[in-house]
Amino acid sequence: MNFTYRPTPISVKTALMAVAFGLLVGAVLIFATGNNPIVIYAALLRGACGSMFALASSIRWTVPLIFAGVAASIAFKGGVFNMGVEGQMYMGGLAAAIVGITFRDLPGYVLIPFMFLASMLVGMIWALPPILAKLYYGSSEVVPCMMLNYVAMYLTDYLVHNVFLASGNRGATIKTDMIAEQGQLTKLIPGTNVTTALLISLAVVAFYWIMIKRSKFGYEFEVCGINPRFAKYGGVNVNTARIGVILMSGAIAGLGGATEIMGVRLCFESRFVGDFATNGILSALLGSCSPLGTLFGAVFMGFLKAGSLTVERTTSVSRAVAVVIQCTIICFVSAKAFAGMLDWKRLPFIRHNVKEGEAS
């Protein structure tokens, strides 16, 4: 089984309508549980941006989604369905933690780039096998990517538990010792988890935009994603371009794992990725895999995450409602017929009536 993923452009109107329909479905679900949707959505909004602390929380959850979203977008643009972002974030995070623990004597201006480079390199290595299987053995990259997520999850657990376990750790959480202090990212807002990882994530988005708009390689891998046969006839080495795409995607995913470790966790914790990769992929799809679209998709998902935590703490509604909203939005975005639903003139019975009216 083999296929080529081709991202379908999504208009701003389609994305906004998908969000509106998702919120509507969530409101129906909330009402069915005996709660007032207005009250719940007010709590959601308050938890996302109702105060400086809430805004900082939203930014904190948005940053890893930007890394995951850009990593997925780059792969999707190149016609590769990289479902292995989660595993690449795990491996990149562990690599950064090991460097930060092992080389404690290095100054910060050397240690931090070293940790970044290690995470990106390991992320690239972890992303490589699925695309090689696709290009040279004719298999789909999706299944190997997903299986490597589980391999990365349990491999990092094993390595931490048996080699890098924190001194004196007897708790249920599998984690390493703290990384060196000079390897920790600086906080932009004191007392919160908003660090310079935010600036790095925005730089990654800018890099993505410049690459696809101003570079030859960006043009080549985008053409490969749209029509690989045309790209081949145009002199583009499709296999080389797709290997470059997946390596770049893995490097960004690994860097995202590193910034989470260096800015928030300050050590490697088992299962720290959580739903970052999944929501990042959803952000990419919601943003039509464009740089700004992915950024806005990640912001929306991050604010929804922060708001849902507040809803769960302050009301009787579970934050699972936010997951329902996310899934509903993606269902509407991915439905081929949904774009037609947004234009009333494209509906068959409306067209028929319009024609009859015009004829009369």
Image (spheres, rainbow, N blue to C red):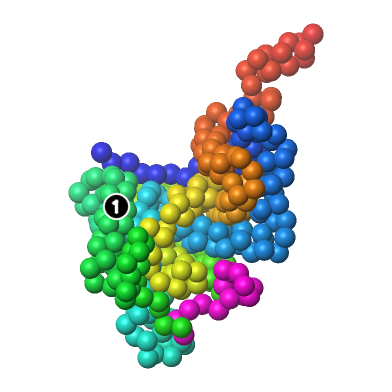
Left or right of residue 111: residue 331: right
Q: Looking at the picture, does residue 292 appear above or below residue 146?
A: below
What quarter of the picture does the N terminus occupy?
A: top left
Q: Residue at x 23, y 45 (%)?
A: 138
- Secondary-structure class at tag 1: helix
Q: Nearer the viewer, residue 258 or 3?
A: 258
Residue 304 can be seen in this image: no
Quarter-wise, where is residue 189 in the image?
Answer: bottom right
Q: Residue at x 31, y 57 (%)?
A: 153
Q: Looking at the picture, does residue 184 appear above or below residue 277?
A: below
Q: Residue furthest left?
A: 137
Name the chief secondary structure element in magenta. Answer: loop
Residue 3 can be seen in this image: yes
Give amino acid for label 1.
Tyr
Residue 134 x %, y %: 26, 49
Q: Looking at the picture, does residue 302 appear above or below residue 10?
A: below
User: Callout 1 environment at 10 Å: few (<14), some (14 to 19), or many (20+)?
Assistant: some
Q: Nearer the viewer, residue 124 or 78?
A: 124
> Which residue lies under the disc numbered 1?
150
Residue 128 falls inside the magenta stretch: no
Question: Where are the magenta residues, as a range?
Answer: 182-195
Residue 255 x %, y %: 43, 68
Left or right of residue 222: residue 235: left
Q: Residue at x 53, y 50 (%)?
A: 283
Q: Nearer the viewer, residue 319 or 147?
A: 319
